[in-house]
Amino acid sequence: RGHGEISVKDIDQVAKSSFPLCMRNLLEKLREDHHLKHGGRMQLGLFLKGVGLNLDDALAFWRYEFSQKVGLERFEKEYAYSIRHNYGQEGKRTDYTAYSCQKIISSTPGVGDHHGCPYRHFSEENLRAALTRMGMNGRAMEDVMNKVRNRHYQLACTLTFEAIHGVPNDAGINHPTQYFSDSQKILQP
Ligand code: SF4
């Protein structure tokens, strides 16, 4: 694949190597439930667009999952429009951009929602379990939990990035797409 692009068949692999926890979580829930509520569709959809998934691949990606839950016809009728809309192909044709960490951290996910920032919105138990699945443990895990207790969620995410990649991230994480591109720079220089 070219630089600055991901295709629908790459998503699971690049998610494992380069997605921040907020996006891994949404992808995991989507794969499990074949559905995400509006807030999750927006947060993940605009992120995927931001890391280079084109409109056709985005439609294929969401269609594959949602049609297993709501059927193909309902997908095309109720959901395809908003995906095209996110890509500026409907309505006012605004080219929407991915949400920043600040916006995601200050969101207020309700029951059944999976958007938001796990460092901010998960229980300690769920956060520890999710971080363990990312390969975190020991001292690095405790350092992350300390930042979370002090409400430094982006620093917690930065420490996670550093532990997983084994290199410092001096700028700090302030945008999910930046987490992705910083990771790809290390993994695919
Ligand atoms: Fe996502 Fe930002 Fe939270 Fe990291 S700090 S999990 S990139 S919202």
Image: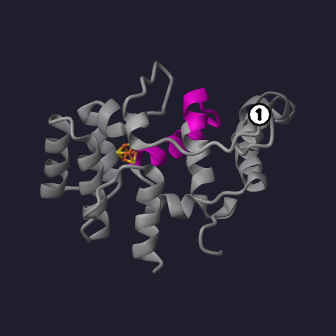
Where is residue 115 drawn, in percent x and y?
48, 33
Identity of the residue furthest to the top in this view: 111
Residue visible at 31% across and 59% down in the picture: 161
Where is residue 156 drawn, in percent x and y?
24, 48
Where is residue 62 drawn, in percent x and y?
71, 43
Where does label 1 land, which residue? 92
Q: Quadrant of the N terminus?
A: bottom right
Residue visible at 87% across and 32% down in the picture: 73
Q: On screen, 188 above or below 148?
A: below
Identity of the residue furthest to the bottom in this view: 189
Q: Principal SS element in the magenta part?
A: helix
Q: What is the span of residues highlighted in magenta in the rendered image? A: 21-42
Write down which quadrant ligand 1 falls in.
top left
Front residue of this view, candidates 168 and 12? 168
The answer to whether 83 appears left or right of 27 in the picture is right
Q: Quadrant of the C terminus?
A: bottom left
Identity of the residue furthest to the right in this view: 73
Kindly identify the amino acid type of the residue bearing the numbered disc 1: Lys
